Image (cartoon, grey):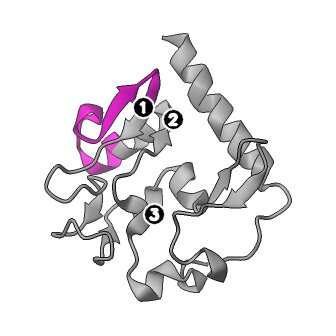
Amino acid sequence: MARKLPCIPTGCSACCRETTMPITKAEAARLARRTGMQVSDFAVDINGALTLLNQSSTRACVFLLTDSSDINAEGLCSVYEIRPKGCQTYPYVLDEQDDAILDKGCPHREQFPDPPGDMAFTLLNLEERILQEGSDD
């Protein structure tokens, strides 16, 4: 599947730069367990939702292997096999009407198929889990 994504052969990592990707507590626990990092090393609580951190020097997700802050620079995800669901479903996002769309911020969006019929449900479910966790605190 990954080889069919246009971002892989082009080395695109635009979606991993200046990210505001929310993650579930279960995803945070899995990332901590598999990387040996503390959750506070890669995520911060923003309005009750754990959100991936960006490196200050590269303005990219802490898990993106890159030395550059250029949005067009190549990068490689160091946790690709265990990346959060939001990363897996990108560039599909929800619009204001909760319909799944291709994110306008993705430079390769024209090369992705239209969102699958169940993508809105998948994204809404993920959003609900993240919001629910925030309200449990």
Q: Residue at x 40, y 77 (%)?
A: 12
How many numbered callouts?
Answer: 3
Numbered disc in front, either 2 or 1: 1
* Residue 14 occupies quadrant: bottom left
Q: Which amino acid, mark 2?
A: Thr
Near mark 1 (Cα within 10 A), the count class, few <14, some 14-19 or many ≥20, is many
Q: Given contact means CB atoms under 8 Å apart, are the residues at marks 3 and 2 in contact?
A: no
> Which percent across, then down, holds residue 89?
61, 58
Q: Residue at x 55, y 78 (%)?
A: 108
Which span is picked out in magenta?
32-49
**In the rendered image, which residue does mark 2 sit on?**
24
Nearer-N-terminus badge (2/1): 2
The answer to whether residue 29 is seen in the rendering is no
> Which percent across, then down, holds residue 47?
45, 22
> Which percent across, then down, holds residue 21?
46, 46
**In the rendered image, which residue does mark 1 sit on?**
50
Q: Residue at x 19, y 60 (%)?
A: 58
Q: Please say if 48 is above or below 17.
A: above
| Local SS, label 1 | strand
Q: Please say if 10 is above or below 66.
A: below
Q: Which amino acid, mark 3?
A: Glu
Nearer-N-terminus badge (1/3): 1
91 inside magenta stretch:
no
| Local SS, label 3 | helix
**In the rendered image, which residue does mark 3 sit on?**
81
